[in-house]
Image (cartoon, rainbow, N blue to C red):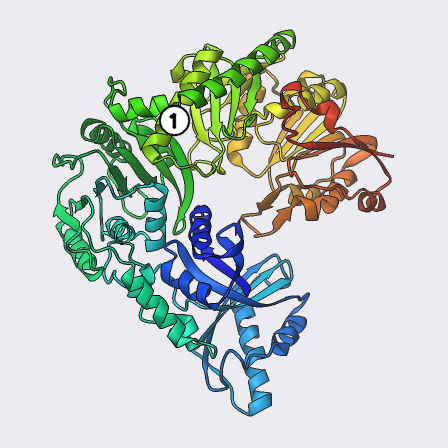
Amino acid sequence: MFPIHVRTASGLEEILSRELLALGLQNVKARNRLVTGVGDLKLLYQANLWCRTAIRVLRPIENFTASDEDQFYDKVKAIDWSPWISPTGKLAIDAHVHSSFTTHSLFLAQLTKDAIVDQFREKTGERPSVDLENPDLRIAVNLFRNQVEISVDSSGESLHKRGYRKKSGEAPLQETLAAGIVLLSHWDDTTPFVDPMTGSGTFAIEAGLISRNIAPGLFRKRFGFQFWKDYDESLFNSLVDDAQKAIKKEKAPTILAFDKDPKMVTIAKENIERAGLGDLVQVEAGDFLTWDKIPSPPGTVVMNPPYDERLPVENIALFCSEIGQQLKKSYSDWTAFILMGNREASKEFGIKTEQRIPFLNGAIECELLGFRLKKDSELESSSAVQSDDEKWKNKIETFSNRLKKNLKHYSKWAQRERLTCWRIYDRDIPEFPFIIDILGRNIHFAEVPRNHDHSPLEHLRYLELMQKAAAEIIQIPFEKVFLKVRKGQKLPKTETTDLLEVRERGHKFLVNLVDYVDVGIFLEYRKIREWIEKEAQGKDFLNLFSYTGTANVCAAAGGAKSTALVDASSTYLDWAKKNMALNQLNGPQHMYYRNDVMEFLNSSKKVYDFCWVDPPVHSVNRTSGQEFDVQEDHVTLLGLVLERIKPQGKVLFTTNCQSFELKEWALKQTCDVEIKEMTHPLTPTDFERSHPFSAWLITKK
């Protein structure tokens, strides 16, 4: 058994984890664009053959620390490379660098090559050569904060290159991403699958491969591991034979692909034939906006329309509106998934979005939008839906009873505190992983993703019933319920206009219930805002990682001499200015800095009386590439903050990192301070059951 690391695209980590678990990988852990675990040679071969969402399968062979290039060179050279490549072999090196002694990946790759070549030259008088196209050994080097991981790449060429697609359009979708989206749609091949803007046919082909249980690796002519010295040819051939025998021969329900460009239809047909799916996937020329040959029964439609990034669209808003109209008109009772890279334009679909999953399509930030389609005025009345409703009757009753209990318990408290924004439910029952906030006359209903056995259609209906139950109990109209899936968020490229006004203790704040999981006000910090307001009189206040500036509103309202906020996001900075203006808190004494917090602290000269520091758990400076980790870097951060604090001044430090440990001893070595834990007194009543953050008050002596 040995460690196995499998790379994937951002957004597909959960799907890949399931694939690897099914193959038998042990100790599976999902990280950013990576799934790790432990397996053997058989599993490594199977991962390359079977994983539809994997990009590369790596075998780590060495880990070490290197603080400079000489140390790195020496440690790479010390690795025995003879088990992996012969003195006359060919090698290629892929290097990735983050926040380390060098920032140049090509330099690191060259340094790795020099160390390996010099080892062989000194031992044998011969040396491997470099071949980037067809190497005998591909090596992956990852350097992160001077921590080095050396892996051998068992895949060779990236696994997204299946081999069936010889031609493509101007903006092709990677096969791994297409497969992941099909899997996320939970299409089960008992209903039709439609790819109405098929391009080179990738969605339809990947759906066909899944339906037929065809291993995507069967199209490959070579894998990197076939050139390793320990390659077990008989084992791999037996796995290939097993994969061939596992192919389903029977014809599945309709898989339909069409495109309005006849050239793309021709390319799609060629690719589909090359994938061996000519008898399964039906390909035609036609425009989605006028197409009327809709298969039955209702199924799943998946599309990747142009969104005015790589492919221009004359009027993207009108185009999206027409897509929405066609879906509502012709695909009643279907589920639809649309990959979009234009957040603003996607609002024009005119359909309630039930699911948002962030992705990267190449360099373009995208979202996979999920919809449950029905006629505009039609109530769900099919026998299937009725049976689902009956199936979930007991669950809805259990959830409703807890919600009623919470409403009775907290509503009197909220009235006493004059609160219109508070949390009524926070995953109280694990079976119902929802976070529900009351925001004035609106409900923010967030689902925390978890594994379930619902089909996409069933799950959308289940969520709808839960939302309706919440709306009925809280006595807020259903159309005022906003559903989100808590799976990260991306700021839109354009300024949002979907802002609503809410109130807290006499202050007005703007929230966005449409675009973000985090709506613009952290309710769990309600008592912190109250504390800041009481502390503010006549003082200079600094807010770092300021978000939408709600704390600055409270400080200014409390009589602060001056306020300053720092955030790297122009969207949040503009939002903060609107919040201040909404409360008539204008003037030159209120400053707004768009900057990286570390860079601001290193360059600022002004000192302050008190400061709130609420850093992210992890972040990356987009300009410098410098990474921040709250556990590793909080002493450095707070040391810089304390340099900007007057004697007897105060710093309130908070974090929502659940495993965080404050390094008090290290902090006290940095500066003469008194530290007091403030988590309990600053946690609001409606958050006492969830423990959302930890807080410390640091007083400079």
Q: In front here: 616 or 26?
A: 26
Please indicate whether residue 487 sits to the left or right of residue 98 in the image. Answer: left
Report which quarter residue 44 is drawn in.
Answer: bottom left
Residue at 54%, 48% in the rendered image: 622
State whether residue 332 is above or below residue 254: above
Q: Secondary structure at mark 1?
A: helix
Residue 700 visible in image:
yes
State whether residue 358 is above or below residue 62: above
Q: For mark 1, does the 10 Å Cα neighbourhood hold few (<14), some (14 to 19), or many (20 or more) residues?
A: many
Residue 539 in percent (x, y) is at 76, 24
Residue at 51%, 78% in the rendered image: 84
Count of numbered circles on the image: 1
Residue 140 in percent (x, y) is at 51, 67
Please indicate whether residue 572 sits to the left or right of residue 235 in the image. Answer: right
State whether residue 25 is above or below residue 220: above
Question: The N terminus is located in which quarter?
Answer: bottom right
Q: Which residue is mark 1?
A: 462
Residue 666 in percent (x, y) is at 81, 47
Q: In front here: 83 or 600?
A: 83
